[in-house]
Amino acid sequence: MRWVIATGSPYFLAGFKLATMVLSSSILFWQRRRWQGEVGAWIAVIVLGRLTLHWFDYIAGTSKMTYAFALASADPSQCDGMWATFQ
């Protein structure tokens, strides 16, 4: 995903996310009458539920990162090069 963000294009990022969503949803839709489709749908629910919990944890921890964001914007030489930004 880092290379998608490294392109610097929010349109490319949105297109990539849309394409992956359409592809995965289509696979589940086509397999909806088979037991593999049912298992795949439940796995997707579990993965997306876990991802939701991860984002809640991330949002709760952003207050701790305020100093790091301020430091990175004030002095980019303090960054380790692992930050991804959009222009």
Image (cartoon, rainbow, N blue to C red):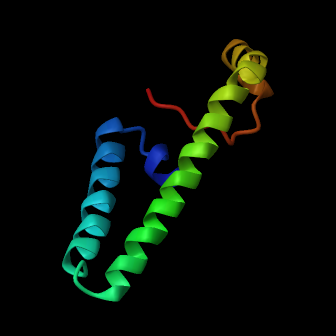
Q: Quadrant of residue 45?
A: bottom left
Spot occupied by residue 76 in the image (x, y as percentages of width and height): 70, 23
- Residue at 26% across, 75% down: 27
Spot occupied by residue 82 in the image (x, y as percentages of width and height): 68, 42
Spot occupied by residue 72 in the image (x, y as percentages of width and height): 71, 21
Which one is nearer the viewer's eye here, 46 or 58? Answer: 46
The quadrant of the image that shows the C terminus is: top left
Q: Is residue 21 left or right of residue 77?
A: left
- Residue at 55% across, 50% down: 51
Q: How many marks?
A: 0
Q: Is residue 17 left or right of residue 69?
A: left
From the viewer's perspective, is residue 10 above or below residue 15? above
Spot occupied by residue 34 in the image (x, y as percentages of width and height): 27, 87
Q: Is residue 23 left or right of residue 76?
A: left
Which one is nearer the viewer's eye here, 7 or 2? Answer: 2
- Residue at 69% across, 20% down: 69
Which one is nearer the viewer's eye here, 67 or 72? Answer: 67
Q: Quadrant of residue 44?
A: bottom left
From the viewer's perspective, is residue 86 above or below residue 31? above
From the viewer's perspective, is residue 28 above or below residue 70? below
- Residue at 76% across, 16% down: 71
